[in-house]
Structures are given as C-alpha cells and as structure tokens.
Image: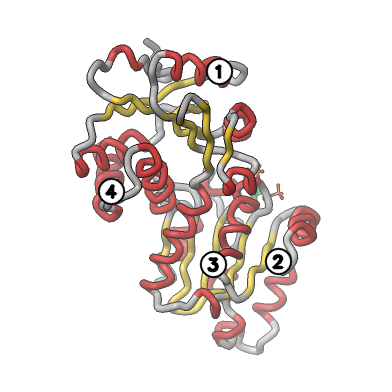
Amino acid sequence: MDDLKPQLNPNDHPGKDVYGVIGNPIVHSKSPVIHQFFAEQTKQPIHYGRIYAELKEFKVKAQEFFAQGGKGLNITVPFKLEAYEMAHKKTARAEIAKAANVLWIKDGELWCDNTDGVGFVRDLERLLKQQNIKPQEARVLILGAGGAAQGVIDPLMSLGIHSISIANRTFSKAQDLAKQFPGLHAIALDELSGAANKSENSNKLENAEKFDLILNATATGLGDSSPIAKELLQKLAHSKTIAYDMVYGKDTQFMKDASSLDILAVDGLGMLVQQAADAFITWRNPNLALDIDGALQATRASYLSA
Ligand code: ATR
C-alpha cells in the first residue's frame, strides 16, 4: 500500500469497533493518536486508522467503510461539505456550519455532526480562564476571512465575547463576513496599524484598546510568514493576550513573534483534541470522562518522535 494513501478495512480488525479519519492529504493527521489515547484511557475496544480518498471518491469510500462494518468517521479537508450533504440526519450544529467532521450510523441511518466549533470554544474557555480573562470583557481580533475564520465566528459569539473585529489582506472579504454576522466589526489592516500608531507612544496604548485574543485564521501558518508584522503584534497585545494560530504541529512565524514578545502563543492542537473528544463520546458513551491534558501531551510527544 502507498504510505501516503493509507486505507482501512474494518474486516481486518475482528473483535474491535473500527473508526477512522478520511481526508486528502491524510498521512499527517493526528486523529489516530488522540482517539487511541482516549480508547486506552477509557478501555474501549476500538481500532482507529487513516483513510486516503481521491478528490472525487469521498462518498464511495465513506459508503464502503460503513458497508464493511465501520462504526464512525472523522472527516477532514476537503470533504467536510460532502460529508454534511451525504448524511440523512444532521445535528443542529452541523446544520449551522453546513459542514460535518463526524459521521456515524445510528438506528440504520447515517448521522453527521460538527464538533469543530465546540472544540474551539472549549479550548478557548480553557485559555481565557488560564489568562484570567472573562469572555464578556474580551476583545478579539480575527486575522483572515476564509473558511477557517468563518468557522470560528459563530462559536466565538456563543461564548458571549465582548467585541469581535476581523481584519484581512483583502478587506472586502472581511466586510462580507461583517455583513453576514451582525456585531462583527470589519477593520482594514492599515486601519489597524493606524489605530496602533495613533498614540504618541503607541506601545503605551491603553489596555482597553488592545486585544485579549488575536487569532490567526489565515493560511500563512502553512508557509513561513505572519499576517501582521511583529511590531504591530506588539502594539495590539498586552501582557495577558493570547496569540492563537489555528494551524497545529509547528511553531508558525506568528507564534514565534508572539513568544519572542512574551505573549502566550498557542497552536490549534487543543482545538483538535477537543473536537476529537466530543466525537469520541458521541460514538462511545456520553458519560466517559476524557483526559484532555493527557491527550494533548501524547499528541505533542508524537510530533517530537516523528
Ligand atoms: P481557509 O479555508 O483555510 O481559511 P482560504 O479560504 O483560502 O483558506 O483563506 C485563506 C485566508 O488566508 C484568507 O483570509 C487570505 O487572505 P486573502 O483573502 O487576502 O487572500 C489569507 N492569507 C493567505 N495568505 C496570506 C498572506 N501571505 N498574508 C495575509 N493573509 C493571507
């Protein structure tokens, strides 16, 4: 089998309930590490593997997996929309997102759910608490206006965040999102720099004008750049600010800049673990108490040993 195109047949794992993650590409997915960790912790007899699907064969692959007795799938890029469309039954949060990252069979029907939003919310609650910031007082800046940015707006609003601003290289896209989500404030990148510079000594911007959470939802994390200059990041942040990059598995330039300024820098691994936890209890048992910190550590360790 091609190492970059792993396949998973539930019949090869007798005596175990088989789950998997399907995507393109898929080989770097950490979902198997997280689910196997939860399975060992809660003594659940499962096997969890990766499935590669060509761009046009998602539906066929997913159907084949369930026909072979597979119990549940996580869905990653670029198939979340198709997963949502193929399910017969959809949870309310999948309906809101119009995208699904979980599929499973219940009473003979194919269900889908979206646990990405709740995963992000849980991770953010943990971080805000750690930094002693109340959601209803928090000022949030989202950088980017693509799919990743869009996916966090509703979850952020559900937390009752005080104010949410969005900035993007192409300003019109931020404006489009602001029209879709009442309460969301679009701000141009140069306006952002201007705001930071308006004070004579801009490093002494009042804390009330700075952001408690700066979220990098651009695609820059995949390359080697940051959407904002380090000097601007410094002006927009205070000592408790969280610089959150939605990418995981590497220290992005945005995170490196934040760390060098003594700003708390986090990647999207916490969100990944939390969305997996929600899928796991949906599939296995809602009463299971999962060790989130343990799963985070195990997943980070798997990067170091890779
Ligand atoms: P995704 O679905 O992962 O969010 P996307 O829809 O392609 O991906 O959106 C990518 C986002 O990253 C966009 O906000 C994009 O900005 P533009 O709308 O101006 O294209 C942003 N982005 C990508 N590369 C960037 C860069 N080098 N600097 C700043 N923003 C960048």
Q: Residue shown at 45%/58% (left/top)?
A: 255
Q: Residues within 10 Å of mark 1 (few under 14, many from 20)?
A: few
Tell me the quadrant of the picture where the C terminus can be found: top left
Q: Closer to the camera: disc 4 or disc 1?
A: 4
Q: Is ligand 1 less than 8 Å from the beta carbon at label 2?
A: no
Tell me the quadrant of the picture where the N terminus can be found: top left
Position of residue 2 relative to residue 108, above or below, is above
The three-letter amino acid code for the residue at tag 3 is Leu
Residue at the disc numbered 2: 184
The three-letter amino acid code for the residue at tag 4 is Leu
Tag 3 and tag 4, C-beta contact below 8 Å? no
Helix, strand, or loop for circle 2?
A: strand
Tag 4 and tag 1, C-beta contact below 8 Å? no
The three-letter amino acid code for the residue at tag 1 is Glu
Residue at the disc numbered 4: 288
- Tell which circle, 3 or 4, labels the residue nearer the N-terminal end: 3
Residue extending furthest toward the top:
1
The three-letter amino acid code for the residue at tag 2 is Leu
Residue at the disc numbered 3: 159
- Tell which circle, 2 or 3, labels the residue nearer the N-terminal end: 3
Identify the image quadrant of residue 209: bottom right
Q: CA distance from mark 2 to mark 4?
A: 36 Å
Tag 2 and tag 4, C-beta contact below 8 Å? no
- Tell which circle, 2 or 4, labels the residue nearer the N-terminal end: 2
Q: CA distance from mark 2 to mark 3?
A: 14 Å
Position of residue 302 relative to residue 54, above or below, is below
Q: CA distance from mark 1 to mark 2?
A: 37 Å
Q: Is residue 166 left or right of residue 137?
A: right
